[in-house]
Amino acid sequence: MRRLVVAACVLSLAGLVGVARADDKPNPTGTWKWTVTFNGQSRDMTLKLKLDGDKLTGAMVGRNGQETKIGDGKYKDGKVSFTVTRERNGQKRVMKYSGMVSGDTIKGKTEFERNGEAQSRDWEAKRE
């Protein structure tokens, strides 16, 4: 009987360790914020992400709280990538985001086209 109790305790502890390890995995779900500077002007950025299995969904929050859904959302092994497509004056502008989740930080690159030239910038967001 004593061995059975010890075995049950060991299995319970192993289960708790497994849960703790699962929680240690990077997870992009949450609200992320960072500041971007264009032409000497700063703008606060907000991104809402949700991971459901392997599917990454979410939205970029713009002016007046208007949300633009992300596209092509992917997440694997701590790496996040997605696009944000905005339309202004009849022209679509696509920004590609990629980054690595580490705790409450995502660090990565944004790629976009400006005046016909490919450009990229670093971005670093903090979970709110």
Image: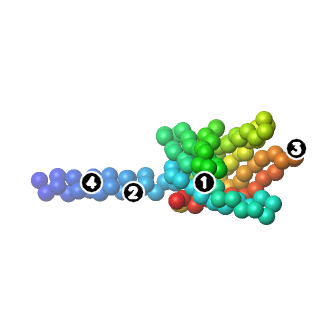
* Disc 1, SS: strand
Residue occupying image coordinates x 56% and y 41%: 57
- Judge whether residue 61 can be spotted in this image: no
Identify residue for label 1: 46
- The answer to whether the residues at label 1 and label 2 have Cβ atoms under 8 Å apart is no
* Disc 3, SS: loop
* Disc 2, SS: helix
Q: Is residue 105 left or right of residue 94?
A: left
Return the disc, 1 or 2, that comes first in the chain's sequence.
Answer: 2
Return the disc, 3 or 1, that comes first in the chain's sequence.
Answer: 1
Identify residue for label 2: 20
Q: Residue 54: x and y, percent?
A: 53, 39
Compared to residue 93, the image places residue 15 above or below, namely below
* Mark 2 → mark 3, Cα distance in angstroms: 48 Å
* Mark 4 → mark 1, Cα distance in angstroms: 40 Å
* Mark 4 → mark 2, Cα distance in angstroms: 13 Å
Label 4: few (<14), some (14–19) or many (≥20) C-alpha neighbours in 10 Å: few
Three-letter amino acid code of the residue under disc 3: Gly
- The answer to whether the residues at label 3 and label 4 have Cβ atoms under 8 Å apart is no
Residue occupying image coordinates x 23% and y 56%: 9
